[in-house]
């Protein structure tokens, strides 16, 4: 089982029962973890991605499929239901994953996806725009005039166009009921991204979700909706673990190669952040804001899978950029 699926239960069972969520870009990493955690909380979760058991996307990671994500969501929901019954809480509806292979750059496919959700459920309560898949295209420390232009423009398509297309078709369904939640996933908060990301196209791509959330907050206001941008810290995704040649169990071995990896967090932390937002009846206090997993962990009092509460933003601000004499362990 992947680290994304190994998220322990830390809050009341079934608080999202009856809710319908769409996690766009849930094949792996944070997207998969968020989908699994929403299912654990009782939501019915549609999960999308381009890699299936019969087709591999340009990302080139064939063992992580959208079918597996859907199965992990359903398994998490079933485990939570069994635990609830055993604890005397009674059975709760939801906790089901439905995988729909979707290319979010194809408006016809996205429209068909939303029409299916409407036809089958008649509602959408939570939209998580987590589509990306552009890490392989980044050229750090390369001037704009020297980078591969096709790769740079492809990043815009993968990280910006997909989010706009998905929201265009999904929001008419989401606003039918007041209180809908839109989460724009990105890399870095609006504050931390004031520092240049050493790649212009990557910098623009990862700053765009902040403005998308800010704009959608204004557009959703009259419908009682909430829109936020959300970032994990230094994420121990499957791809990052593979990059360092470690596993979730041995991840600290990578600190020798990359000392800042000591502040890394599992996908569980940002997954719990989305669950907390979705379950919070007062979540509109966050609307339009740029949030981080560490910030919400403190606000909602949850931890990572290992019981720690890594403050990646604080560590980089104080220690890496501020020169404070401290270690990553002081920020966990």
Image (tube, rainbow, N blue to C red):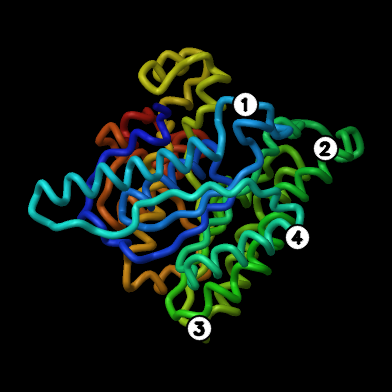
The percent position of residue 124, horizontal first and vertical second, equals 49, 68
- The quadrant of the picture occupied by the C terminus is top left
Spot the residue most to the left.
88
Q: Specify few, some or many for label 1: CA neighbours under 10 Å numbering under 14, 14-19, or 20 or more.
A: some
The percent position of residue 268, horizontal first and vertical second, equals 38, 40
Measuring 37% from the left and 47% from the top, which residue is drawn there? 37
Q: Earlier in the sequence, mark 2 or mark 1?
A: 1
Q: Earlier in the sequence, mark 4 or mark 3?
A: 4
**Quarter of the rendering containing residue 167:** bottom right
Residue annotated with mark 2: 151
Q: Is residue 35 above or below residue 305?
A: below
Residue annotated with mark 3: 223
Alpha carbon separation for disc pair 2 and 1: 22 Å
- Judged from the image, the secondary structure of the residue bearing numbered disc 4 is helix
Q: Which-is-in-front pick, marks 2 and 4?
A: 4
Measuring 33% from the left and 50% from the top, which residue is drawn there? 297
Q: Are marks 4 and 3 in contact (CB under 8 Å)?
A: no
């Amino acid at each position: 089982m992947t680290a994304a699926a190994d998220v322990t239960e830390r809050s009341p069972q079934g608080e999202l029962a009856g809710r319908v969520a769409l996690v766009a870009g849930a094949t792996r990493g944070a997207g998969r973890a968020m989908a699994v955690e929403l299912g654990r909380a009782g939501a019915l979760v549609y999960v999308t991605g381009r890699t299936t058991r019969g087709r591999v996307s340009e990302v080139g990671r064939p063992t992580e499929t959208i079918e597996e994500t859907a199965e992990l969501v359903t398994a998490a929901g079933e485990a939570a239901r069994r635990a609830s019954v055993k604890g005397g809480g009674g059975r709760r509806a939801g906790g089901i994953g439905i995988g729909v292979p979707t290319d979010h750059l194809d408006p016809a496919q996205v429209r068909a996806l939303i029409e299916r959700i409407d036809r089958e459920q008649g509602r959408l309560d939570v939209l998580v725009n987590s589509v990306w898949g552009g890490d392989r295209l980044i050229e750090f420390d390369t001037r704009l005039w020297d980078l591969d232009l096709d790769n740079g423009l492809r990043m815009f398509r993968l990280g910006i166009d997909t989010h706009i297309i998905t929201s265009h078709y999904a929001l008419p369904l989401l606003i039918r009921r007041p209180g809908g939640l839109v989460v724009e996933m990105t890399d870095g908060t609006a504050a931390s991204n004031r520092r240049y990301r050493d790649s212009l196209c990557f910098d623009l791509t990862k700053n765009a979700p902040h403005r998308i959330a800010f704009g959608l907050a204004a557009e959703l206001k009259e419908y009682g909706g909430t829109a936020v941008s959300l970032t994990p810290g230094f994420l121990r995704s499957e791809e990052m673990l593979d990059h360092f040649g470690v596993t979730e169990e041995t991840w600290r071995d990578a600190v020798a190669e990359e000392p800042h990896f000591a502040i890394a967090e599992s996908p569980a932390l940002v997954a719990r952040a989305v669950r907390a937002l979705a379950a919070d009846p007062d979540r509109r206090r966050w609307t339009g804001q740029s949030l981080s997993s560490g910030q919400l962990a403190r606000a909602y009092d949850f931890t990572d899978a290992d019981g720690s509460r890594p403050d990646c933003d604080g560590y980089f601000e104080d220690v890496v950029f501020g020169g404070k004499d401290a270690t990553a362990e002081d920020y966990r």
